Image: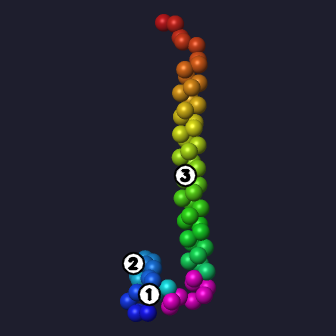
Amino acid sequence: MAENSEQKITIDNVDYKLGDLSDNAKGQLRGLQIAENEIRRLNSQVALAQTARNAYMQALQAELPKKEQ
């Protein structure tokens, strides 16, 4: 396989070949990827919860007695 096709990762604007990383560095990279995926998942859950909260608030407001003026 040609060396130009080797995967790279950019950290702090520096490119690194994945094959040049130590096993420990690769493990840290996997941990970082897992953490980033979890953050994305949790942000999606927050967005869903906020949407539900807004819907419940609208439904509640529709059920409240109307104030007389």
Q: In x, y percent, where is residue 22?
A: 57, 89
Label located before the other in sequence (3 or 2):
2
Vertical placement of residue 67 versus 28, above or below: above
Vertical placement of residue 14 versus 31, above or below: below
Tell me the residue at 45%/79% (across/down): 9
Residue named by callout 2 = 13
Q: Nearer the viewer, residue 15 or 1?
A: 1
Q: Which mark is residue 44?
A: 3
Residue named by callout 1 = 6
Marks 1 and 3 in Cβ contact (< 8 Å): no
Q: Hey, what amino acid is under mark 1? A: Glu
Q: In x, y percent, where is residue 23?
A: 60, 87
Q: From which residue to which does the magenta span run?
A: 19-26
Q: Hey, what amino acid is under mark 2? A: Asn
State how far apart marks 1 and 3 are (Cα). Answer: 33 Å
Image depth: mark 1 or mark 2 in front:
1
Count of marks, rendered view: 3
Label located before the other in sequence (1 or 3):
1
Q: Hey, what amino acid is under mark 3? A: Ser
